[in-house]
Image (spheres, rainbow, N blue to C red):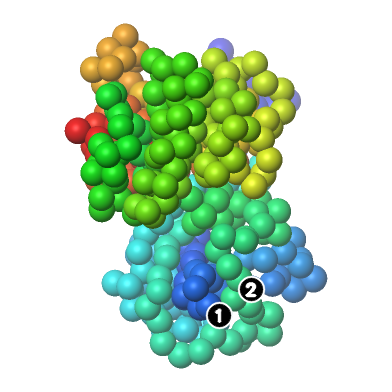
Amino acid sequence: MSMSPSTPNTEPETVKTVHVAVAAVCRHAGGREEVLVARRHPEQHQGGLLEFPGGKVEAGEPATTALARELYEEVGLRVRENDLDFELRLIHDYGDRRVQLDLYRTVRFSEAPQGRENQPLMWLAVAGLDPAAFPAANRRMIQVLQLPARTLITGGDITPERLANRLQGWGGSQCLLRCPDIDDDAYGALAGECLSVAREAGCRLLLHGAPQRLASLSGAGGLHLPWRQANQLIERPISNAYRLGVSCHDLAGLEHAQALGADYALLSPVKSTPSHPERLPMGWDGFERLVTAMDLPVYALGGVGSDDVMMSRRHGGCGVAGIGFWWH
């Protein structure tokens, strides 16, 4: 059927995607990790907010080439492309345009930073960065910088001695003490012994289960809610001083976790897994479709390994979680 001249063309216009690369330029000072940030000029879009240095990637140009150039032009730092380590890729939709943001991290640079565009520069502690002080497109980057790349989930027959053995070499990770087959009293006793083990290994220990478990073990680093627990809540059940995680399997679960104010979510299964053969794996493309719309760091779970961290981050995740790749 032909269209009359007066009939409007309702086909959606192609939304332009702008490719931007930014850097978390980090240093250690006074026993803490700091990152270089700039404050946007008041007259700029989202003026007054903080941002990471970087800029637009031209068509056909490697992101690292563009970023090395922008770091020198914008803040006077000389950084070799090989010293830029990929951290995260995410898509942010502004409605009239989409931005693909690639985050890189480096601790290797020369020259002293200077605001070559008269922008104020400052070094801020990574652990203390406030996502609300940055443009919305940057906020998941901050969360990723503050979180470990791997969430270790304990397997069966756990003892403090076995945990100490398994945690060797995994310093900097967070460890989820998952013991679904024991009651609260037994769990509390075990967790009390495991706290010092995890601390000595350089790992944050997260409790698994209902919020009251954390109330009796305030020395833990946080709480992870199984979906059956999270689904019953309408607000964040613990203080912001602790890390809160939620297990999810679909978009509705992720949206609920974000509404609860969770600090991260586990999303599964990404790949097929013998522990849950009845669940259809979503694959990396399915994982990316779900996490793209979220302002929430998400770990890939289910059939993934320790070496899949970069794969997760290239699809919008913050890392990987699992049992098999470290416990067994």
Which residue is found at the position 40% from the left and 39% from the top?
Answer: 194
Q: Is residue 191 above or below residue 128?
A: above
Say left or right for 85 vs 266: left
Front-lying residue, 104 or 214 = 214
Say left or right for 33 vs 12: left
Q: Which residue is mark 2?
A: 38
- Name of the residue lying farthest toward the right: 43
Q: Is residue 252 above or below residue 89?
A: above
Q: Which residue is mark 1?
A: 74
Q: Amino acid at mark 2?
A: Ala
Kindly check if marks 1 and 2 are in contact, taking CB atoms under 8 A apart as contact: yes
Front-lying residue, 265 or 281 = 265
Q: Amino acid at mark 1?
A: Glu
For the residue carrying disc 1, how many other residues have a C-alpha within 10 Å: few (<14), some (14-19), or many (20+)? some
Q: How many marks?
A: 2
Which residue is found at the position 44% from the left and 71% from the top?
Answer: 67
Looking at the rendered structure, the secondary structure element under dot 2 is strand
